[in-house]
Amino acid sequence: MFAVQSIHSSIAKLKQTALALSIGLGMGVTLQAESSPELIKQLQSLKSNDASNQIATDTIKQLNAANDVTLIQSLTAMKGATPVGRNWLMGLANSLYRKSGKSQTAELNKFLSDATQDGEARYTVFKWLTASNAELRKTLLDGMKQDPSPELRYLAISEAVQAKPDTKELLSLLDSARHAEQVVSIIGVLKEKGTVVDQVKQFGFLTEWKLIGPFDNVGTVNFDKVFPVEADWINGKVKDEYESKLVADGKNVNAKWINESAKSEDGTIDIAALYSNEKGCIVYAATEFDSEKEQDAELRLGCINGNKTWLNGKLVMSNEVYHTDMKIDQYTEPVRLKAGKNQILVKISQNEQKEQWAQRFAFQLRVSDSTGKAILAKGK
Amino acid sequence: MRFKLRNTFARCALAFGFAPAVFTSSLQADWPQFRGPNAGSVSLDSKLPTKFGGESNANVAWQTKLPGRSVGGAIVIGDQVITTSSSGMDQRRLHLISVNDKDGSIRWQQEFVARGRTNCHPTSAIAAPTPVSDGKYVYAFYSSNDLACVDLDGNLVWYRSLSTDFPKAGNDVGMSSSPIVVDGVCIVQVECQGDSFAAGLSCQDGRILWRTDRPKQSNWASPVAIKLPGGEQVVVMQSSQDLLAVSPKTGKTVWTMDVKCSSIPSAMAAESRLFVPAAGLTVFDLSSAGAVPSKLWDNNKLAANACSPLVVGKRVYTISRTVLASADLFSGELKWQARLPDAKSIWSSPVVAGNNLYIFTEDGKCLVVNLGDEKGEVVETNDLGESVLGSPAISGNALYVRGVSSLWKIAEK
């Protein structure tokens, strides 16, 4: 009996080897036969480049043809995989689910209930399990308002808000919500019910700024130019005044720092209003953030204009994009805050488009943790 | 018999190294890409109903509700109607869905998570480009610059995150340029204010065979494959700063012209002419192999704001907001204009079956216009009750309409 099994196993391995070799020869790549778990590991660590793509294309061919790889194996492998690798694994998982997923309900339920598994994989499993089971969907979502998977949490909160909860429940949902549009939406519903939430504090917008400008950006050519104020700020020593661009009246005046507080509930600094709708110019905005401790955080910027952001003298964001959109959390960047005062500088670059929809000159910035929950400055 | 008879031509074409661009539109042909065979938007032999939808649901063979939303079109390969969707938080979930032509049931689905930007205008979607197929594989591209290749059973062949390769690619209005496949190369045009480029990727494994910088301006137009008199195929790309042709295999420039083209409607070729939305409509002579095409005519009364031009017989048609124009394709002489009643906003490039033009509006109306020599007459206004922004597909005697949230098959009952 064991001898027969061993022969079958050997034949299976030979077939796998032949398959791998034939694929390898077909692709002009030399391959070694590997087991399905080893092949899955290759997908986990994938990057997006040509060499990776060649390997991954061969690997997925072998996995699609293999009989020994399981749906749960492919889903479990998504944990710790690169973002690109997760999509390859999800592609494999979708094929496996079509083949045998509906007979694996118990295993999938167990996988979904394990909150330590990859959030994208769990959301995918949730959709499979609840596609034709509205009751199960409701039951599961009821317990997912603080789920570590952003997608499951978002969906759970969306459904809960639609169920017209009372104010107490809404405040609880607001505490759990991380997605910016969802937070704004809940605050709006609370307002309709007579409960006003401090949106600026909820998001942790930075509201107190010092601005200086306008500096020359005619022809939109100076986005990367290091103006003296920028160099001085990076070196930690700024002057009170700098030479500005020629403004509309043709006079060359010195630019001075001005203090500005965000007045709107979305923390927007309206630069156009401060600088007489000046076009073809650059304005710098500086602030400091007093962090309770050294910690990981994210800078989350919304800006309708070209922008660069520095934290403690280090460039952390650069987006030379004009007039496509401005929204909360439009650009996010993970950073490490030091304990105490952190210096933040934003360079905002306006072009010279004349269209009515291309006149805004504005930005908003907040500090959050990696999930989007506000990190407030010391004493706020 | 996975491909069935009507896909035989596609298989032969592949076997002999031809690309979808050489398909001719015929009754049983696939509709493999944005605007169909040759990007012509025409299926002359097809007989479609002029009256459909509405309260009676007339001539609706099936309607299949799909996840999320889409503003791209569907394609038809054999007995599969294939489309994309984006759903969930920030439309991060990218779907590729095959629907059985026979009954509208879902045959297979693939799904990925967007790795690039997912901001877009509320009327748009991350599923904006129309997928493309070479008859063997399907290539799905999204506004987030995720590009996936699957076989006709929905199994992943390869995946590429172009926003991981080029992090500043994208714009927050949403990208919508549809990919094409020529000579075993999948070509994408990713033009924006950040990392702006066009690239050719190996259909076999997604390797980037070539990449060329493009103007740093937002552009939603799609590339188009054209065949030169010598038989060589080239890819024509347009932008607000240039018009050029490149070799599909190498990306090398075949010719380039300083032409300021529209950035939404796309060019098309017919009758050895290239029709380019520029200065209204500008037409170039493609009869000389390899040479820079010379301008034949332009006419600023043939401007198109969103819909791509199309050619039927000896006429070229364009739509400017709610005005349909017909001109002589040899001289550019305007023959007639017709105001389109009840057409508030049109984003979907129209298609022609027989002698009727099918124009879908953003609010779900379909105006059927009979194309006469002397005038265009709206013979029917149908209502699907669902927003349509993608260009429809035609195969056989059926029209396939990708609404924002569902897929429709329209055919005479």
Image (tube, rainbow, N blue to C red):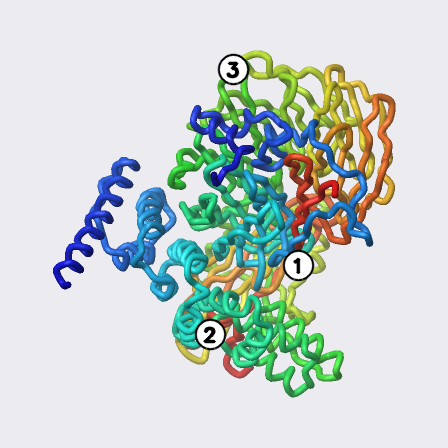
**Would you say the residues marked 2 and 3 are in contact, meaning their CB atoms lie under 8 Å apart?**
no
- For label 3, the SS is loop
Which residue appears at 55% of the width and 56% of the height?
A347
- Left or right position of B390 against B364: left
Pointer 3 chain? B
Q: CA distance from mark 2 to mark 1?
A: 38 Å
Pointer 2 chain? A
Q: Which residue is mark 3?
A: B290
Q: Which residue is mark 2?
A: A148
Q: Amino acid at mark 1?
A: Ile
Which residue appears at 72% of the width and 26% of the height?
B281
Which residue appears at 54% of the width and 21% of the height?
B227
Vertical relation: A126 (above or below) A255: below
- Residue B99's spot in the image, x, y percent? 58, 49
User: Callout 2: few (<14), some (14-19), or many (20+) C-alpha neighbours within 10 Å?
Assistant: some
Q: Which residue is mark 1?
A: A271
Q: Quadrant of the N terminus of chain A?
A: bottom left
- Residue B63's spot in the image, x, y percent? 68, 52
